[in-house]
Amino acid sequence: PLAVEKLDSDLIVAKLDSLKVLIRGAEVFPPVCFVDKMILIWKQIHNVVFVNRHEALIPTALSCLTSISKAISGYDKNALTALFRVVWKDLQRGEAPGMGKVLEAFASASAEACSVALVEALPSILQLLAKDEGLRPMLVLESTTNVLSFYANLCKHEEATQELNRLLGQLADLLCTLVTGNDRELALRAQAAVVAALPVKGFLTGSQLQILKEVLLQVATSVDAPAVGDEHILLLAEATRTNCLGHDLWHILKQEIAKGYCPGKSERILSMATACPGSGISMAIVLPCVVASFVCATKDNQTVYWNLLAKCLVGITCQAEKYGMKLCHVSLLRKVVFAWMDAMKRGHENESIETFHEVSVLVQKLSEISSGRDMRDIISHVEEFCVDTSLATSSLLLLKCIVCHVRPELLSANQRLVELLTGAHCRCPTQLVAQCLAGYVNKLPDADLEKTLGCIQPSLEPDWTLLKTELLLWVIKGLLLRGYPNLAPYTKLLKELLKDEKLGRHAAKGFQQILQPLVLTMEGHCIVKLMHPQRFFVETVDFLIEGFNSVTAEAVKDNFLMALCCQLAYVPKPVVNTYIDKILPILVTALSSAEESVVAECVLPCLTENVGLMASHLDSVLEQLLRLAKEPFPMDVRRSALQCLLRLSTIKENVMLYKQEVLQGLTPCLADRKRIVRQVAAQASSLWHMVGEPSGV
């Protein structure tokens, strides 16, 4: 009684405590304790969710409704029904937003609660779905889908009452009508509801299943049908998993795939074919055909179809993981890799990377999953093939896909290949050589690593070129991620490169490349030590600050500035704060002295992300930001300056003193000739008008 009484408190904390007590009480106290109070509890929950709209309390309030309903379910079904009737009646008044969440909260409590909710709510739901009222049917369908999912998991359909069976039959008819209707969004939502209900044996009749089968077949094979969406693939996969549609459809898709490439149609068929791991039988029907077509497309130089088939195989691999279907990844990878090699032998040695894009994604995916002795054999073949093709672009891409994605224990040092890669880095126009070497540097055992570095280090000497710079950046990335203890010789080279007027800017941008989670990732089984951004920052920040303060050439000064700014987004604020007294003056000075591109790309985004640290420099910062927010500065500079001003309005210290100055300075920006600038200016002006006002005003 005390907990129920506290629900009426004006204090949000008291309401929250009361809700938590009731949730816990529903688990330990006899259900009879709640029967007399259940309507009163609901009324208070209704006030929280719909009247007062306490957003912070709504999830707990809904959990309380679930707990109370669950407690009553096994004790008194009549009381449970009476409670839901009151709930549903209250929800019907004005059809308040959020009623679907309440319905879901009640239905999720138990099988009894779910059945009661469906019997009482379905008549209204069917009426709402039959109406064309804009977004309303979509919202109703979303909640209906969730309740059907609860029904499939909690209830035994064979024990359903005659009334519930009748209502569910009407719902199934309506869903099939919506699936075949002209409203695409509504059709997709209806498909999601059907997917939720598929595990309920007998929910759909034979004729309704035939309708779904025809819809899926039309989407898969007709160029005039709506575009294939994730909802179609999910529906087909779930229908296959529950064995609702038989296997005829899969044999039809297999025949269509075997016919070869048909523009517009093949894209549809292969997208739908990714659903085949819904069952072992369907996968056995389709997968061999897709693989055989992939090999044939390689031999026939059908690049477009080859990539489409590779994308399909990626989808099948992902769906097989989702549905727990056994797939021999190493065997599939072997076929794909050897098909790639055959394509190169047929004249694709130096094709652009885009030519092999989807195939490279497939090789990466399979490399991440595969393991064992057979995988070592594949790696060995790829390495030898790279040597035999004199490191052609396509073979380097294949090597990168393998090396940067296999498990470290599968790699061993191939000294001959490393020497060739090191010697070729100056003549390869892409980053592939550097990325391959970075993969080896990151994953090889310690003993092999030193030998590899011994081959690479002679190449990291002046005279510097763009490709040498790329190699240094990628080697540092590989070493940093694995936690290599002695980075100093390599970061020292970076410092010298930043002073180079031609290559310094590229080296500065490379600081972000080193820290970005690209190419060498945990998903690709790369060794990624914790806190590597902090370590890199600490190892470089001193010479970056010293370089900025000591050099006189503005272009070189900007290189050190950019290298510093590129790191700050990846380093935790407490680490940055230890150097903030030295860093912040540099950033503030750079607002007035650095070239515009550096200000736009580095300084302003950096300041925007760290506005809380600028309280002691507001005088100079605000003056410079208001200057940069106006023409003649480029649009991206003006917009970034305004975004920084917007964020500055949120800090608590001293901003009230500058309110009028900022508002006056923003006035010209509201008339900027670029709409995107005016929008940010309006947002900033609105927030600065609120500075110093009581919250809620």
Image: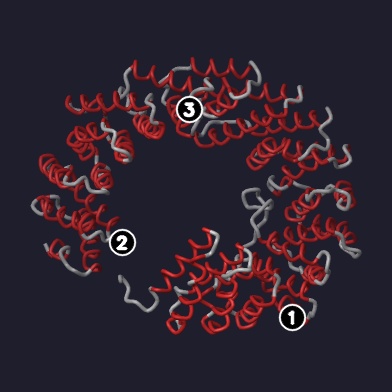
Check disc 1 and give the amino acid type.
Glu
In this rendering, is residue 403 above or below 321?
below
**Which quarter of the figure is the N terminus placed in?**
bottom left
Where disc 3 sits, the SS reads loop
Graded by Cα atoms within 10 Å as few (under 14), some (14 to 19) or many (20 or more), the crowding at tag 3 reads few
Inter-mark Cα distance, 3 to 1: 61 Å
Find residue 417 and report its horizontal and vertical position in percent. 86, 46
Pick whichever, 629 or 107, lies toward us.
Answer: 629
Q: Are marks 3 and 1 in contact (CB under 8 Å)?
A: no
Tell me the residue at 84%/56% (across/down).
467
In terms of sequence position, does the residue under pointer 2 or pointer 3 come before the other? 2
Find residue 8 and report its horizontal and vertical position in percent. 15, 64
Pick whichever, 178 or 669, lies toward us.
Answer: 669
Q: Is residue 143 left or right of residue 514?
A: left
Where disc 1 sits, the SS reads helix
Pick whichever, 370 or 221, lies toward us.
Answer: 221
Give me the disc on residue 56: 2
In terms of sequence position, does the residue under pointer 2 or pointer 1 come before the other? 2
**Which quarter of the figure is the C terminus placed in?**
bottom left
In this rendering, is residue 187 above or below 605?
above
Q: Is residue 218 left or right of residue 119?
A: right
Q: Is residue 337 left or right of residue 467?
A: left
Check disc 3 and give the amino acid type.
Pro
Tell me the residue at 49%/14% (across/down).
248
Task: Provide the residue designation for mark 1.
Answer: 546
In terms of sequence position, does the residue under pointer 3 or pointer 1 come before the other? 3
Q: Are marks 2 and 3 in contact (CB under 8 Å)?
A: no
In this rendering, is residue 219 above or below 53?
above
Graded by Cα atoms within 10 Å as few (under 14), some (14 to 19) or many (20 or more), the crowding at tag 2 reads few
Find residue 506 and report its horizontal and vertical position in percent. 77, 62
Closest to the camera, between mark 3 and mark 1, is 3
Task: Provide the residue designation for mark 3.
Answer: 226
